[in-house]
Image: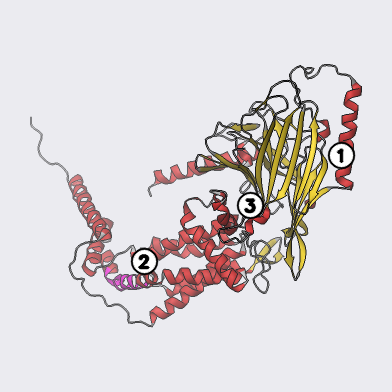
Amino acid sequence: MDRTAWIIIGVCAALLGLNIYMGNNKKEEPVPAAPVPAQQTAAAPAGAPAPGAETPASPAAPEQTSAAKALEEDKTSPITLTATQEADGRQEPFITYTFNRIGGSIGAVTLHNDIVDSQKVADHNITINEAQQRGIGELVFNMDATQDPSYDNTVYREVKRTADSVTLEGYDAARQLFISKTYTLHPVKNLEGNVLPGSKYLIRLTVSLLNKSPNVQDLRYMGIFGGSAYPIAKSEPKDTYTHFFYHADGSLEQEVPSYFTGGIFSTAKARVLEGPLQDLTYAGVMSQYYATILLPQDKSNGSTVYATRQEFPLAHENNTLVPGVTVAMGIPNLTMAPNEIKTLTYDIYTGPKFNAYLRDLNLTYPAISDIMAYGWLVFLSVPMNWLLNLFHGWFGNWGVAIICMTIVVRALIWPLHKKSYMAMKRMSLIQPEMAKLKEKYPDEPQKVNMEMMKLYQKYGINPASGCVPMLIQIPIFFAFYRVLQYSAELRGQPFCLWMTDLSLPDTVGHLFGIPINILPLIMAVTMIIQMRMTPQAGERSQRIIMNLMPVMFFLFCYNFASALALYWTTQNLISIGQTALIRRLPMPVLTAAKKKKPGFFQRMMDQQRVALEEQQRKGKGHNMRNITPKKK
């Protein structure tokens, strides 16, 4: 690239960095945590006193007392529903839903087999929506883009319980609505009648509304709260993997917390109300490895999604504040006559982003696995994730699964690797002739390039063929990187020796505050060995770029999940073995190529040679001095 191109790239990079910086550091009004439910004012029905008007103190006192009592009871005798699974011949708690009496919602979801951080916070289970005072499944009123909504402050009580369900009931005096909510564990079976593993994270919410008002009620601006998502630990990037999302009109839309703070190219916004949306199939929030998804059933889906940014304290890390997002999904437009009953049904997924689990649920909940957001590399990421799960099912160790997957990948590109090595070997054989050309035309680089192309054509050498395997491996590398970014399968999973968690760097100690990670060091060494075994061909600038590759990959992998360094180290070792095998084969001989129909790269070289000849001819014409006498 010329100097102008580099200047443009530099300016774009600087602007992008400045935009990110401004977005993350923009001064804004503090975003408070959700108000304490007992103190939030519900929207009043028609005929009620306007906000701020004096109201008798005595009617409000019992409600406030009841709310305070409900908050206390939530602490002393919480309403819970626990699902179990068999482990070592006995039933062990697997997931626990803890309900809020105010709002009749799921206040928190504890995953008993998942911990926050195996290296730093190993004694705290993952608890979804833990720092949010509003619960999943709570009714939301007055959803609007210009102001904060109001939430359901109704005090609910448990009226029925079975082994797999809890029913809560309450009466919203302000809106004259009797509300019943039933939460039921919801296992889903496949066509063979087997329970899908991902459905153990599902719970069904059935909401029944009874209009006790003598008037018709319009509930078009009501919604269901979908909970909050935020980094589960300080070690998780703050504004990279946390999103609110919704799936409408066949595509997934998602945004990070900084979407609300704005930057150079965007304006700050306190909240968003997306809609009206066509075919809104689900909405939710997610952190790097966990998601909460509202899945409307039985024509319960509306056409709007409300979202906002909020700061959340991490109780297990000294109440460190981290940015997060909340979401609510609008319900269908409801008009209720006096004593009319309306029923809404939602399935709620609160669990890890296991691609295999979500993919199995696609038949029941179309496109639910789209939340993995692999991007344009999905055609590589999905098969790689499938291979990982396949080999893990066989061997029971994720590290072994990564090694086996790498063997499969290297076996598939073995023919290309062999062909590339032979091509680079042939290119190295013409290096002496190329050196002679540079000596013959020391001040004519265009002439040198033109003669080099004639050499390539004479011996049938494709200068790009040596780069093909690397060009193929780089998308595979980044596809696996995407798999590791969003898949929860490797969290807390050991491999062997010092590698105790494949989702984290394999840190064994610190030197002057710098973590010492072993696998990236081994990866860089094996990459250098691999490159030293490869024939050195091409221009000096190309060789310099190739020699810098180990440094680039080392820096990229050093503080990332050790699973990525394990994958690249394994592929380096296999490549070294494959190269050693190729070197035992008969080496190519530099002979003139038989004439045949030119291929794509051959045609490109011919076009470039013609262009160089034309450029050289024009250059010579430009350098000739006109000595024709001027006419008098």
Q: Report, in whole angstroms, how far the alpha carbon at label 3 lies from the one at label 1.
A: 33 Å
Q: Report, in whole angstroms, how far the alpha carbon at label 1 lies from the one at label 2.
A: 71 Å
Q: Quadrant of residue 433?
A: bottom left
Question: Of residues 88 and 558, which is closer to you in this image?
Answer: 88
- Along the horizontal axis of the image, is 483 left or right of 472? right
| Mark 2 residue crowding within 10 angstroms, few (<14) / some (14–19) / many (20+) | many
Dot 1 falls on a residue whose secondary structure is: helix
The x, y position of residue 80, in whole percent, is: 80, 50
Q: Residue furthest front?
A: 339
The x, y position of residue 524, in whole percent, is: 54, 68
Res. 466 mark: 2
Q: Residue furthest left?
A: 632
The x, y position of residue 584, in whole percent, is: 38, 83
Give the amino acid type for the residue marked by disc 3 in the picture: Gln
Q: Mark 3 and 1 residues: CB-CB less than 8 Å, in contact?
A: no
Q: Which residues are magenta?
A: 421-433
Res. 288 mark: 3
Does residue 227 show up magenta in the picture?
Answer: no
The x, y position of residue 540, in whole percent, is: 38, 63
Using the image, determine if residue 126 lies above or below residue 259.
Answer: below
Dot 3 falls on a residue whose secondary structure is: loop
Of the numbered discs 3 and 1, the one sitting upstream in the chain is 1
Examine the rendering and report whether any part of residue 524 can be seen.
no
